[in-house]
Image (cartoon, helix red, strand yellow):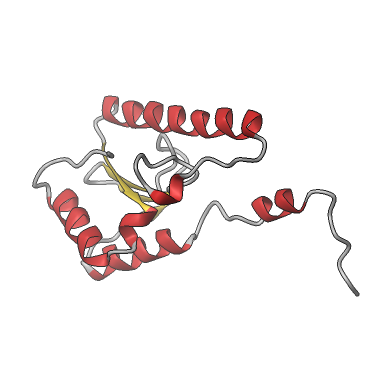
Amino acid sequence: MARKPTAFPRSAQMRSIRKKDTKPEVAVRKLVHALGYRFRLHRSDIPGTPDLAFIRARKAIFVHGCFWHQHRGCRWAKLPRARPEYWLPKLARNQERDVANLKRLKRLGWKALVIWECEVAVPAAAQKKIESFLSGNGRILPR
């Protein structure tokens, strides 16, 4: 049976975008696992519900989509031309929530790393950034 077209095809498309298990997130998980680290996924008891949580080390990794979290200077973070009255506040709220979650984590004694979707496209650079963060050779904050 043919599917009935929706009145708002863009809405249907956006609804189909997943929150968990995205391609960049799975790529980071495979990379971290291959480095020998073990982690917990999407711990809701930790501020921001990090994608990867290293409980004993009190470290968290967030894998952010460049569009949804508006990665500055990234070509994938372009603002939509359609319905800016909807999208601008929505994307701004995402950024504000990210900053608030990182501050809450810091107050609780956690260290956090943000890996951007575009960084995952270059696995060697992402691996170096993750290794540096997890090995304790300094704290890497989001750009």
Where in the figure is residue 42, as x and y percent of width and height?
Answer: 45, 49
The answer to whether 108 is drawn above or below residue 45 in the figure is above
Where in the figure is residue 64, as x and y percent of width and height?
Answer: 41, 47
User: Split into 4 quadrants, where in the image is the N terminus?
Assistant: bottom right
Where in the figure is residue 62, as x and y percent of width and height?
Answer: 37, 47
Q: How many marks?
A: 0
64 or 13, which lies in front? 13
Q: Is residue 79 left or right of residue 54?
A: right
Residue farthest bottom in this picture: 1
Q: Is residue 24 left or right of residue 93?
A: left
The answer to whether 30 is drawn above or below residue 88 in the figure is below
Which residue is depicted at the point 76% across and 54% down?
A: 9
Residue 103, by quadrant, is top left
Examine the rendering and report whether any part of residue 12 can be seen: yes
Residue farthest front in this picture: 81
Residue 58, by quadrant, is top left
Where in the figure is residue 59, as x and y percent of width and height?
Answer: 26, 44
Examine the rendering and report whether any part of residue 39 can be seen: no
12 or 47, which lies in front? 12
Q: Is residue 113 left or right of residue 8?
A: left
Which residue is depicted at the point 58% across and 55% down?
A: 18
47 or 14, which lies in front? 14
Which residue is depicted at the point 23% across and 38% down?
A: 141
User: Split into 4 quadrants, where in the image is the C terminus?
Assistant: top left
